[in-house]
């Protein structure tokens, strides 16, 4: 790529932008980049190779230094790239400590922090004093939900004009529509916080009342949580439970397109809930928890379980599975809400407007001295 890079978007150190392994942060920034009017002036930076060919990407190879912490060495590598390329704006994804490190290395460069998680549970922003320091170092902070924005500003007082809500979006018109099957789908990391253990237990309770339904679970179970905690339920459910393991994002979307119901019963406070949005957009009726930012997505277009317990979750699944009219209504209204409120074109335009304000008066990017490769 020979065009000047005016904006550098910095992935977290361990985040991968790939067809099989991408998480919500990587997928979201890829979507923002694809639909940004600054696309030709943007480059995504990361530590691992990227196998998407629709976004400009540069792997920062050889960035580690034995005598430095990873976050310090990574910030130094990103700062060197920004200086060599004449970058005007660096957007740090989800790592406040990287942003504060970059401020010392790039005192004249515009810096933005894109928060995808609860800042009060992240290194560098847990306390109000830490968040005040990050706010001073950043030229702008983007938050994926009002929940995240509120958590960042809690206890700060004063000017909040730097802190903006930029919700994630989807390419709605590219989402496939398939004939629905009696499937309840879960897609996500197989960890306790996602409520997947309670979901399997709930389906085991509900299964006698739902003889034609199946539960499909997709996600990497690195620590063997399901086999360790749910051996009896897995054996009892047999072929009615499908464990798909890690699947590509397009395969996950195909699963949602086929499923009548999607379950996103997170035990933690979801900062945004991209999976909830994807399920709604693909025409699923969604059963979700009430925590965090999920409610901002779901509104009144799904079934909310106030406390994620197996018995309460089982009852919600049974009621929805047995009520064809209500299920169809939630599918229709959920898809309509996703299209009207969370289309990626509108989300990218919102982000671009904030970028434009930051870039006014910033020096133009010069022609690169090094070619991009990745």
Image (spheres, helix red, strand yellow):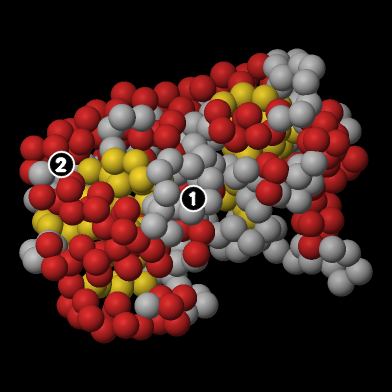
Callout 2: SS: helix
Residue 157: percent from left, percent from top: 78, 21
When asked about the image quadrant of residue 107, the answer is top right
Marks 2 and 1, the one that precedes in the sequence: 1
The residue located at (70%, 17%) in the rendering is: 161
Callout 1: SS: helix
Residue 188: percent from left, percent from top: 42, 59
In the rendered image, the vertical position of residue 295 relative to residue 98, given as above or below: above
Which residue reaches farthest front?
311
When asked about the image quadrant of residue 231, the answer is bottom left
When asked about the image quadrant of residue 166, the answer is top right
Residue 348: percent from left, percent from top: 48, 28
The residue located at (40%, 44%) in the rendering is: 306
Taking the image as drawn, is residue 34 in sight?
no
In the rendered image, the vertical position of residue 210 relative to residue 341, given as above or below: below
- Residue pointed to by mark 1: 24
In the rendered image, the vertical position of residue 267 relative to residue 112, given as above or below: below
């Amino acid at each position: 790529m020979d065009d000047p890079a005016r904006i550098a978007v910095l992935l977290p150190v361990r985040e991968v932008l790939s067809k099989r392994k991408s998480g919500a942060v990587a997928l979201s920034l890829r979507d923002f980049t694809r639909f940004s009017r600054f696309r030709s002036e943007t480059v995504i930076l990361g530590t691992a190779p990227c196998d998407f060919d629709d976004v400009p990407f540069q792997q920062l190879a050889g960035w580690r230094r034995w005598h430095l912490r990873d976050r310090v060495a990574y910030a130094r590598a990103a700062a060197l790239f920004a200086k060599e390329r004449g970058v005007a704006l660096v957007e740090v994804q989800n790592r406040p400590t990287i942003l504060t490190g970059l401020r010392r290395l790039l005192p004249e460069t515009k810096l933005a922090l894109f928060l995808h998680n609860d800042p009060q549970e992240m290194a560098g922003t847990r306390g109000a004093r830490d968040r005040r320091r990050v706010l001073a170092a950043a030229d702008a902070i983007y938050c994926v939900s009002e929940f995240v924005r509120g958590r960042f500003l809690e206890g700060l007082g004063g000017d909040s004009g730097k802190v903006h809500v930029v919700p994630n979006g989807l390419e709605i018109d590219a989402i496939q529509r398939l004939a629905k099957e009696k499937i309840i789908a879960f897609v996500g990391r197989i960890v306790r916080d996602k409520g997947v253990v309670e979901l399997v237990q709930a389906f085991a309770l509900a299964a006698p009342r739902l003889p034609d339904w199946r539960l499909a679970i997709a996600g990497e179970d690195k620590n063997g949580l399901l086999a360790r905690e749910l051996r009896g339920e897995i054996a009892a459910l047999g072929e009615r439970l499908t464990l798909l393991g890690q699947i590509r994002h397009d395969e996950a979307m195909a699963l949602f397109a086929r499923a009548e119901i999607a379950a996103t019963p997170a035990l933690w406070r979801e900062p945004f809930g991209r999976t909830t949005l994807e399920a709604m957009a693909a025409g699923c009726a969604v059963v979700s928890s009430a925590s965090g930012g999920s409610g901002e997505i779901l509104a009144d277009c799904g079934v909310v379980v106030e406390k994620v317990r197996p018995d309460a979750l089982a009852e919600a699944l049974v009621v929805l599975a047995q009520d064809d009219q209500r299920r169809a209504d939630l599918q229709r209204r959920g898809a309509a809400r996703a299209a009207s409120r969370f289309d990626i074109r509108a989300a990218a335009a919102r982000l671009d407007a904030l970028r434009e304000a930051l870039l006014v008066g910033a020096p133009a990017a010069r022609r690169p001295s090094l070619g991009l490769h990745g």
